[in-house]
Every structure is written in structure tokens, then in C-alpha cells.
Image: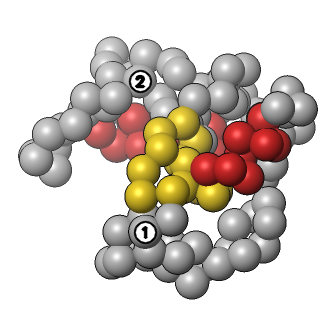
């Protein structure tokens, strides 16, 4: 995904299904609608989740909106400074939780079908 400081920046790829978004007619609004459709799993709209689960790992900053929310795998609250992983579907889990979960070959616990 291409990001810059501009609020009018365009995504090159859907973070959920991996579809190329750069050529969509309608610009940013069409891209946002596509991603929302993918997240909601609307048939015939978005392409649905991609098969390979990708994620980024980072330490949760103290000002994160995730602080005091629960990990959907272990049901423990997120704490500042802990290592978390955000999947390509934008769901976030403790890194060790999603790592163990993915050892079973399944996708996102929330979006897996």
C-alpha cells in the first residue's frame, strides 16, 4: 500500500484481498468502498480475504486506541509496549497469539470462513 502525508493519497492495493486499486474509477471514494466491502464480506463487491495471511509486527505505543481492548484469541487486554501483529484484514492480535493460531493453517480468527 502506498502512503504519504496527503489525505488525498490513493492506495495501490486492497489490504484485505490484494486487488489492484490504483485503476478504479472514482478515486479514493471507490477504493474506500472496495476495502469496506471486503471487510464486510459482501458477495460480488470486494474480492474477499486473500489466501496468504500477511501481517506487520510492532510494539504497541502508549497512545494506541487498542490499549484496554481484548485480543480476540486469548481475551487478554492489549498493554502498551507489548508486541502485536496487525493482519492484512486490519485485525490486531498479540503476536504470539496469532503466530500460534496460524500454525494450524487457518486465517484471521474473526474473518476466517
Residue drawn 34% across the image and 43% down it: 29
Horizontal side of residue 66 vs 32, given as left or right:
right
Report if residue 56 is visible in the image: yes
Q: Which of the two labelled residues, at mark 2 and mark 1, occupies the earlier sequence position?
A: 2
* Residue 39 placement: quadrant: top right
Residue drawn 65% across the image and 78% down it: 77
Q: Secondary structure at mark 2?
A: loop
Residue drawn 68% across the image and 50% down it: 96
Looking at the image, which residue sits at the far bottom? 68
**Which one is in front, 63 or 31?**
63
User: Residue 22, percent across and down?
Assistant: 31, 20
**Which one is in front, 99 or 73?**
99
Q: Is residue 23 above or below residue 7?
A: above
**Which one is in front, 51 or 32?**
51
**Which one is in front, 107 or 9?**
107
Q: Quadrant of the C terminus?
A: top right
User: Residue 83, percent across and down?
Assistant: 51, 57
Q: What number of labels is visible?
A: 2
Q: Is residue 69 above or below residue 45?
A: below
Which residue does the numbered mark 2 point to in the structure image?
13
Which label belongs to residue 81? Answer: 1
Amino acid at each position: 500500500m502506498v502512503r504519504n502525508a496527503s489525505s488525498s493519497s490513493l492506495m495501490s492495493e486492497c489490504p484485505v484481498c490484494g486487488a489492484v486499486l490504483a485503476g478504479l474509477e472514482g478515486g479514493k471514494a471507490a477504493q474506500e468502498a472496495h476495502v469496506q466491502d471486503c471487510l464486510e464480506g459482501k458477495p460480488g463487491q470486494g474480492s474477499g480475504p486473500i489466501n496468504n495471511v500477511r501481517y506487520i509486527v510492532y510494539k504497541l505505543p502508549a497512545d494506541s486506541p487498542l490499549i484496554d481492548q481484548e485480543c480476540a484469541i486469548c481475551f487478554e487486554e492489549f498493554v502498551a509496549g507489548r508486541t502485536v501483529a496487525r493482519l492484512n484484514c486490519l485485525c490486531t492480535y498479540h503476536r504470539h497469539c496469532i503466530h500460534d493460531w496460524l500454525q494450524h493453517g487457518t486465517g484471521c480468527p474473526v474473518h476466517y470462513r
